[in-house]
């Protein structure tokens, strides 16, 4: 296995059966070697710096009805909210004062009638804090909408493809949503000059080992600037509410594989990792992740942005917990980098 890991390190590519072998290997020494090589590459590219992104959850209103998501359109148990422009700017102001230089505007997928409102908000943030990067995570939209937001000043866009397999995609999403369109959106975003992030859920209902291999191959081929991967966690008011959660160890293994395959990628150690395991964030970083996204959203609304159950929203996952985050990182030899943390891929 060590020779296989070294081959991935040197060539950044393997055959499908070799990815399967890495995902299923059982010898703890082999797993430790994979993680150590991923850390080595991360530190060569970025040192022991962890980049921060300040997350602002704009709204839990969504036009889609994805079967795994707690803010799906048909979930009548959610108290819906949308932050005002003034509330969003207050979140950014607080974050800027703390030291954040990247803001992530995330929310449910709205209709195009709100596109100009988003564009105006982006322009306002850029005018007030021109040195800051703006990342959007707002779902699928027409190319023209993405262009509008890019022209307004948006720098990055996160759009997890969730799975590259058409059949699995159809099992996770309602009729009318297709993986072909999701991938087209990612291509539009890249063409428009965004730094683009794609990614998957690990352990999603009906997901197979072969699906994970397909996703590894797609991500390597697409070459995203950012890779967002987190374990599936059920939300009790969804059709998948009784399915088991994904595994932290498998997610960490994917971080390591993709770090060796795409050395320059920005890889968050996601909130879902910290939700499933007290040391989940640290385990992600020790597997090659180099980004953490504390929550800048108003505390009164965080529990309502319930994509999944028991989502971590306090402690080091909130802006108020930066000191705790710094201490957690120090225990594993890492430290916060307060820069924008742009992707070296350009």
Image (tube, rainbow, N blue to C red):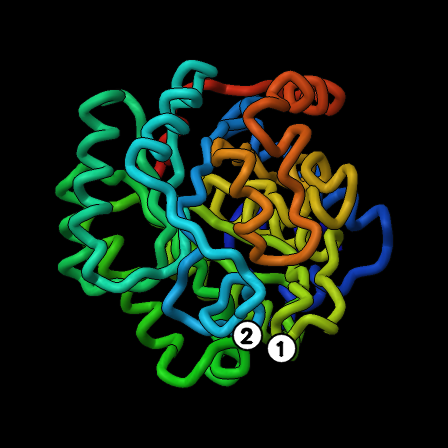
What quarter of the picture does the C terminus occupy?
top left
Q: Pointers 1 and 2 in contact (CB under 8 A)? A: yes
What quarter of the picture does the N terminus occupy?
bottom right
Between residues 254 and 189, which one lies in front from this camera angle?
Answer: 189
Residue 14, image x, y percentages: 56, 62
Between residues 46 and 126, which one lies in front from this camera angle?
Answer: 126
Query: In the rendered image of this protein, does residue 128 appear above or below residue 116?
Result: above
Between residues 82 and 225, which one lies in front from this camera angle?
Answer: 82
Residue that badge 1 annotates: 239
Q: Describe residue 240's horizontal placement relative to residue 301 as left or right.
A: right
| Residue 245 makes an appearance in the image | yes
Residue 197, image x, y percentages: 40, 50
Q: Which mark identifies residue 67?
A: 2
What residue is at 71 percent from the left and 34 percent from the top?
A: 282
Query: Residue 330 lies in what quarter of the image?
Result: top right
Residue 96, image x, y percentages: 39, 19
Residue 74, image x, y percentages: 49, 74
Q: Describe residue 329's horizontal placement relative to residue 301 as left or right.
A: right
């Amino acid at each position: 296995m060590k020779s296989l890991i070294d081959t991935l390190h040197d060539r950044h590519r393997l055959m499908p059966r070799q990815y399967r072998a890495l995902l299923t290997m059982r010898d703890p020494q082999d797993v430790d070697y994979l993680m150590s090589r991923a850390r080595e590459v991360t530190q060569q590219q970025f040192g022991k710096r962890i980049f921060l992104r300040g997350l602002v959850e704009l709204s839990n209103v969504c036009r889609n009805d994805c079967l795994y998501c707690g803010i799906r359109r048909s979930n009548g148990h959610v108290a819906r909210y949308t932050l005002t422009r003034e509330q969003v700017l207050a979140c950014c102001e607080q974050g800027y004062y703390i030291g954040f230089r990247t803001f992530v505007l995330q929310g449910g997928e709205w209709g195009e009638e709100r596109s100009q409102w988003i564009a105006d908000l982006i322009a306002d943030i850029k005018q007030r804090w021109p040195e800051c990067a703006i990342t959007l995570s707002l779902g699928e939209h027409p190319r023209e909408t993405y262009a509008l937001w890019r022209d307004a000043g948006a720098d990055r866009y996160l759009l997890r493809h969730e799975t590259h397999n058409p059949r699995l995609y159809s099992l996770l999403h309602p009729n009318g949503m297709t993986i072909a369109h999701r991938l087209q959106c990612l291509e539009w975003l890249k063409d428009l000059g965004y730094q683009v992030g794609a990614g998957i859920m690990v352990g999603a209902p009906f997901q197979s080992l072969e699906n994970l291999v397909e996703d590894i191959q797609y991500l390597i081929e697409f070459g995203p600037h950012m890779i967002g991967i987190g374990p599936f966690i059920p939300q009790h008011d969804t059709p998948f509410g009784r399915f088991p959660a994904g595994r932290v160890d498998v997610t960490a293994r994917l971080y390591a594989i993709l770090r060796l395959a795409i050395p320059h990628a920005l890889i968050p150690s996601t909130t879902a990792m910290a939700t499933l395991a007290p040391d989940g964030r640290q385990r992600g970083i020790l597997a090659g992740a180099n980004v953490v996204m504390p929550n800048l959203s108003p505390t009164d609304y965080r529990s309502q942005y319930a994509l999944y159950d028991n989502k971590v929203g306090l402690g080091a996952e909130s802006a108020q917990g930066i000191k705790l985050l710094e201490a957690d990182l120090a225990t594993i030899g890492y430290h916060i980098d307060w820069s924008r943390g742009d992707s070296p891929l350009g």
